[in-house]
Amino acid sequence: MKIKTNKCQFEALLKHVLLSFLTLFTTLTFGQIKDHSEAVNKKADKIEQKVIAWRHDIHQNPELGNREFRTAALVAKHLESLGIDVQKEVGVTGVVGILKGDKPGPVVALRADMDALPVEEKNDLEFASKVKTTYNGKETYVMHACGHDGHVAILMGVAEILSEMRSDLKGTVKFIFQPAEEGAPKGEEGGAELMTKEGVLENPKVDVIFGLHMDALTEVGQITYRPAGIMAGVNDMKITVKGKPAHGSTPWLGVDPVLVSAQIITNLQSIVSRNVALTDNAAVVTVGAINGGNRSNIIPEQVEMLGTIRTFTEEDEAFVIRRIKEIVEYTSKAAGATATVEAPYSASYPVTFNNEKLTEMMLPTLEKSAGKENVTLIPAITGAEDFSFFAQKVPGLYFFVGSTTIGTDIKTVGDHHTPQFLMDDSSFKTGVKAMCNLVFDYMALKSQ
């Protein structure tokens, strides 16, 4: 019987066979290399309370993007105390530590983001944030509402463990403490994009990079991952609608930009529901802010809207932005108004892409760090991460570590970027073990 196979099916089959072979090869190889996980586990147990204390301190003293002065000083002081070479003010407030092992080998980068968010904390914690600052010209509270305080504390712990095991390192570790993952202030550069521009992946040249993110919607002890695109690319947007002002009692004498904006918001939702091939890739178009007018009986001249665009391919990104501009232009014209679209407006991150070969190679490491039964493959996530800029330059692996107390009803959990965001202190040890094991196992595999 003759079987017909199209090119896409053949390529998918070939890819599956190659990845299966790589997984088998990696599994066999892991049995031949020295396993440092037992020593790592003991040191992770020993350092756990220090990691928790660091996290509490950072949580109580949060700082916004490109303003992480205190956090950076804390990190730099700790790395220096370990005998690690330290570079300061990389990418504005970033800190980079370089630890050379006693044996030659690859350069492995580990990344933690340091910035907090303009959110008022509403948790009853002894170390809850009460900090206020100015953001975009307005006074605001500041909170670590996305887990970056945990990321910093974890990597500080990893640095201490690896420095104690320097004689076992077959290569160099580069610790990247990164500012402004949530975006730099308007008019400033920052984050992974700026650090990459400034050469953070060079001198010494990085071979591979690993990063993690605490996950409030996953229980403690769990690790989740995905090869290829794990998080969406993101562009923010600003839409400005201009009409003709009038008295609220005589709308026919003006052109109402509030009404036009409402029509635009509604029409934009047809992009995802009617234009994007959702069976191939997800997409999101969200308007998160709308501002215009100051009285109930005055039709204003102008309305401004801010929103976010999430896609998983460059083709979808270009297509969705084009459709947004078309809808905004023609909806406003139909009402006699004018409108402009700025996309991206202030930030644009590419898709966070996990190198597929690297992911398969290091999957056994994640499994031994948390237990095979606790490591789960997940669908792609429409959140975004500027770790993507690093992973564009060198092979990268980004994964999630559960931070919710075991047995908690996930429906009751405060999500990321909310005032109720919480992390269980016992969650950080899994991250410490995983990052240490990734370093040792990658170096060992590359030395075979």
Image (cartoon, helix red, strand yellow):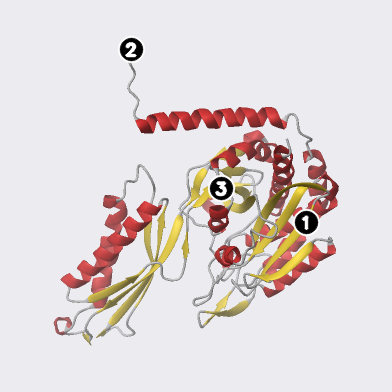
Tell me what residue is drawn at x 19 percent, y 85 percent: 249
Report whether 121 appears left or right of 281: right
Q: Earlier in the sequence, mark 3 or mark 1?
A: 1
Q: Which residue is under mark 3?
A: 409
Mark 3 crowd level (few <14, some 14–19, many ≥20, 10 Å Cα): few
Identify whether 39 is placed above or below 28.
Answer: below
**Which amino acid type is marked by label 2?**
Met
Q: Circle 2 — which element?
A: loop
Is mark 3 in CB contact (under 8 Å) with mark 1?
A: no
Q: Earlier in the sequence, mark 3 or mark 2?
A: 2
**Which amino acid type is marked by label 3?**
Asp
Q: Which residue is under mark 2?
A: 1
Identify whether 246 is placed above or below 1.
Answer: below
Q: Earlier in the sequence, mark 2 or mark 1?
A: 2
Q: Which residue is under mark 1?
A: 99
Identify whether 132 is placed above or below 173.
Answer: below
The disc placed on residue 3 is: none
Residue 135 point in image, percent of width and height: 54, 78
Q: Is residue 193 visible?
A: yes
Report whether 298 appears left or right of 183: left
**Which amino acid type is marked by label 1?**
Leu
Q: Nearer the viewer, mark 3 or mark 1?
A: 1
Separation (CA) of disc 3 from disc 1: 41 Å
Q: Nearer the viewer, mark 3 or mark 2?
A: 2
Residue that protrudes farthest toward the bottom in the picture:
247
Quadrant of the rendered structure where residue 21 is?
top right
Residue 376 point in image, percent of width and height: 57, 39
